[in-house]
Image: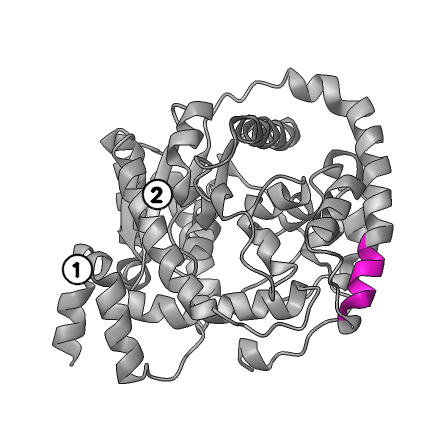
Amino acid sequence: MTSAARPRRDWAPRLWHGADLPAWLRLLARNHFAVQPPCWHIAAVTCAASVLNTTLRVVSEACYGGRVARTPIREAPLFIVGHWRTGTTLLHELLILDPRHTFPNYYQCFSPHHFLLTERLFPRLLWFLMPSRRPMDNMEAGWDKPQEDEFALAALGQPSPYLTIAFPNRPPQDQEALDLERLPRRAREAWKRAFLAYVRRLTFKDPRRLVLKSPTHSFRIPTLLELFPDARFVHIVRDPYTVFPSTVNLWKSLYRNHGLQVPRFGGLEEHVFRTFNHLYEKLEAGKRLVAPDRFHEVRYEDLIANPMTGMRQLYEGLGLGGFDEAGPRLRKYLEEHAGYQTNRYPSLAPELRAEITRRWGAVIERYGYGQEAAAAS
């Protein structure tokens, strides 16, 4: 069954279920409470959850706040960057197999206020709410599986472009929070404090090196270096002619499954076109700030064709060491997932393909996909 054909799970966890009451009310107010009737049940559950999250946040802060604030971050995070649907999730899955690495899981991203207090209990009680597969690509899901920390930032009430998912029929929200540079100074400093506090909570839970994956971090390398001067980055890139339909499908899936409106998808393709160019503009500028031995690039197609070689090159390029110890786990994972099939999309219409070439041509040529497209034709 394709992702577009999967039924919506009405009582599955939503992104907003982890928000506290102030963040939830701000989200509703800025969108004029424009929740549509088919989504009222999501809003009702979120109202109740936000009150509970607020209470648990206070208790968690009382129990753990002082110790978390004193927690040192001994290993700067490893950030996986790249556009949506380029293989960032696969790379995340591979890197966290290293026993020296840890990651934020679904529960920690969907309950960022109080996971230190509740993670031992709530996932066990609520196991039946979590689907076993992600709706957009059929990859494994579960409370203990790795997830994007951008979802945690949205639930923490920080500016996030992912708030667009809640009200998809309104203009895109918080686009200035992509690179953070256009945020007012006070809001930017608040974002930095919130992100650092979240990383400290994760580190208090598990002191190993964090591997963080979010396409939004592709825009934010300067800010991330302010917080973590020794951070490492790995950028994964994929054929843009595949990325375009896959990204459109991703947003449609998120709007359908997590939105508080019945989505019309107006302007979605234009949004994908513009965001892609913005991402690569900021990524190119950001990577010039990073030492060569702290930034590594990999092509998705090369990683899929020879994953062990690709991962060895990544370890060597970033000076991670320890590949011989991580290698057996990587090999076992690859054997267990050998039958996984990525989503398949209809061939691009000639007009759309030409438009992708026209608007994304610089990136297509930079990473060698123009030559491959010409050879294939």
Q: Residue furthest front?
A: 32
User: Residue 17 appears at what percent x and percent y?
Assistant: 75, 52
Q: In percent of the image, x 39 and y 46: which residue is there?
A: 81
Residues drawn in magenta: 39-46
The amino acid pointed to by label 1 is Glu
Q: In percent of the image, x 46 and y 44: which residue is there?
A: 178
Q: Are marks 1 and 2 in contact (CB under 8 Å)?
A: no
Viewer-proximal residue among 102 and 136: 136
Find numbered disc 2 in the image and state the secondary structure of the residue it sits on.
Answer: strand
How far is the residue under mark 1 from the one under mark 2?
Answer: 20 Å
Viewer-proximal residue among 54 and 104: 54
Q: In percent of the image, x 34 and y 70: which residue is there?
A: 242
To which residue does mark 1 refer?
365
> Is 10 displayed left or right of 302 in the figure?
right
To which residue does mark 2 refer?
234
The crowd level at tag 1 (other Cα within 10 Å; few <14, some 14-19, many 20+) is few
- Going from N to C along the chain, the mark reached first, 1 or 2, is 2
User: Residue 61 appears at what percent x and percent y?
Assistant: 78, 26
The amino acid pointed to by label 2 is Val
Q: Per the image, is 101 magenta?
A: no
User: Residue 195 appears at what percent x and percent y?
Assistant: 57, 32
Looking at the magenta stretch, what is its main secondary structure?
helix
Q: Between label 1 and label 2, give the one nearer the viewer.
A: 1
